[in-house]
Image: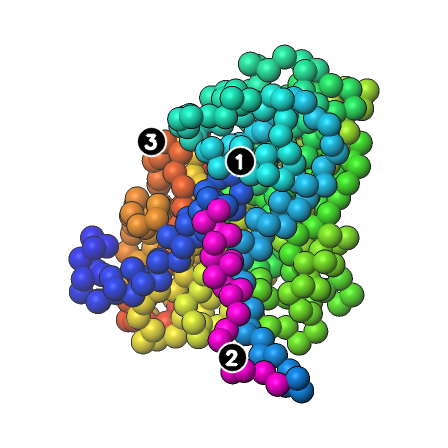
């Protein structure tokens, strides 16, 4: 049993420490699905961070003492999104929000875009809040089912930080439904993390399926009957001139770019930014559902396997490029976590996760443990001890419902050296 092996090896504490990061990820989600706190509370943190430090009395010739600015990443991203909301085309009388987790969301729209006569909110996962504003109609449904909304009845549709939570068929449904409910010339606004950046950062969110790149979302909007009218970025994460990856944490200084420069430059470089923002105007074109499905299939064929590779490695372990992918080299005597993550959702149904290992020639006995876990606490769903005669380890997973924070983990017993492929093959067989 894996629990007995951990007890014998003394690895349980190492595992628990390593997995604290998933709790932090859950608490620091973006946008309408798990924002770290209500905007007012988040902004209070910012005010405290920017409070000037006490300084001695200044003479006319003494420069002021400026305390270092401490940024909260969630605040930075949230307020940048607020700026884009303030710039959306004015005059919408009927606004449809897809994904609106609480009263704070409607207050946020009121305080940025402005008050609208009628605000429809579609939300499936959060409960209907008490004391909704008088202009709000709450619709309990999914993003791909807007059947409660009449065709050509909305001036604007906004879906913030939502597409990356959907599966391919739901993305297609959302885009086609958005085109249906908008009036001719109506505006669709969407924003989401950029896979070109999240992939390079090895960044994960436990509720995200796949993120889309800027060219992909451009094409999807066009196929759905929209003319893209605005494309912007939030938080520059890659130098547009050199392609160099910039620190995601705004408190980590960069030799060339200040945080303010990165905020400003991002607006014209969405392809190099952590978040893209797109707006499209409803044209007379009919959405091409066949082409949308085909494009989403191609995107998921590439993005889903890449999603499974966003694993976190134990410090000090070497990566060895080999044909077909990278392998993690574990030396003899290394006891503890090899990799964990990527913190991804698993749909209801049956799944198979396959690990590939290559033990050293002199390694014998049980040299590793592979398991699949889920949730903020890393609850083990299935596990298997790995011995010297094994090269491929397939674990069967049954998910009775949608599971968030799915992880594939490898732990070394320290009884011998081996290499393990830094990718787990995940095959779904949905109910």
Q: Secondary structure at mark 2?
A: loop
Q: Which residue is mark 2?
A: 55
Q: Which mark is residue 88?
A: none
- From this view, report whether residue 271 is shown above or below residue 253: above
- Gap between marks 2 and 3, in whole Å? 59 Å
Which tag, 2 or 3, sits closer to the chain's start? 2
Residue 403 at x, y percent in the picture = 39, 38
- Gap between marks 1 and 2, in whole Å? 37 Å
- Gap between marks 1 and 3, in whole Å? 36 Å
Residue 372 at x, y percent in the picture = 35, 48
Magenta highlight on residue 367: no
For the point 47% across and 54% down, the residue is 44
Which tag, 1 or 2, sits closer to the chain's start? 2
- From this view, report whether residue 103 is shown above or below residue 87: above
Q: Secondary structure at mark 1?
A: helix
Q: Which residue is mark 3?
A: 400
For the point 80% across and 31% down, the residue is 227
| Residue 196 appears in view | no
């Amino acid at each position: 049993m894996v629990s007995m092996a951990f007890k014998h090896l003394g690895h349980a504490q190492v595992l628990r420490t390593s997995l604290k990061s998933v709790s932090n990820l859950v608490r620091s989600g973006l946008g309408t699905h798990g924002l770290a706190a209500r905007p007012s509370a988040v902004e209070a943190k910012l005010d405290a961070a920017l409070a000037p430090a006490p300084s001695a009395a200044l003479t006319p010739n003494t420069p002021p003492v400026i305390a270092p600015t401490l940024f909260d990443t969630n605040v930075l991203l949230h307020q940048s999104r607020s700026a884009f909301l303030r710039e959306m085309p004015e005059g919408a009388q009927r606004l449809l929000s897809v994904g609106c987790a609480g009263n704070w969301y409607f207050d946020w729209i009121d305080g940025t875009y402005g008050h609208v006569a009628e605000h429809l909110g579609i939300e499936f996962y959060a409960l209907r809040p008490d004391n909704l504003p008088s202009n709000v109609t709450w619709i309990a449904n999914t993003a791909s089912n807007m059947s409660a909304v009449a065709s050509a009845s909305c001036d604007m549709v906004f879906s913030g930080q939502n597409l990356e939570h959907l599966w391919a068929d739901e993305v297609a449904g959302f885009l086609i439904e958005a085109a249906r409910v908008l009036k001719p010339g109506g505006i669709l606004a969407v924003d989401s993390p950029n896979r070109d950046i999240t992939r390079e950062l090895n960044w994960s969110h436990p509720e995200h399926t796949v993120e889309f790149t800027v060219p992909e979302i451009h094409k999807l909007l066009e196929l759905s009957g929209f003319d893209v009218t605005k494309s912007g970025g939030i938080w520059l994460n890659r130098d547009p001139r050199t392609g160099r990856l910039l620190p995601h944490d705004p408190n980590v200084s960069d030799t060339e770019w200040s945080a303010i420069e990165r905020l400003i430059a991002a607006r014209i470089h969405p392809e190099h930014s952590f978040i893209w923002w797109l707006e499209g105007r409803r044209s007379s074109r009919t959405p091409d559902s066949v082409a949308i499905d085909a494009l989403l299939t191609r995107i998921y064929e590439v993005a889903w396997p890449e999603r499974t590779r966003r694993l976190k490695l134990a410090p000090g372990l070497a990566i060895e490029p080999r044909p077909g992918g990278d392998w993690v080299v574990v030396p003899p005597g290394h006891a503890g976590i090899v990799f964990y993550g990527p913190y991804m959702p698993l749909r209801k149904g049956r799944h198979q996760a396959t690990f590939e290992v290559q033990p050293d020639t002199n390694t014998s006995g049980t040299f590793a443990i592979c398991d699949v876990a889920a949730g903020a606490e890393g609850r083990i769903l299935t596990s298997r001890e790995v011995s010297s005669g094994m090269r491929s380890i397939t674990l069967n997973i049954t998910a009775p419902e949608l599971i968030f924070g799915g992880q594939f983990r490898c732990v070394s017993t320290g009884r011998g050296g081996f290499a393990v492929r830094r990718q787990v093959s995940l095959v779904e067989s949905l109910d």
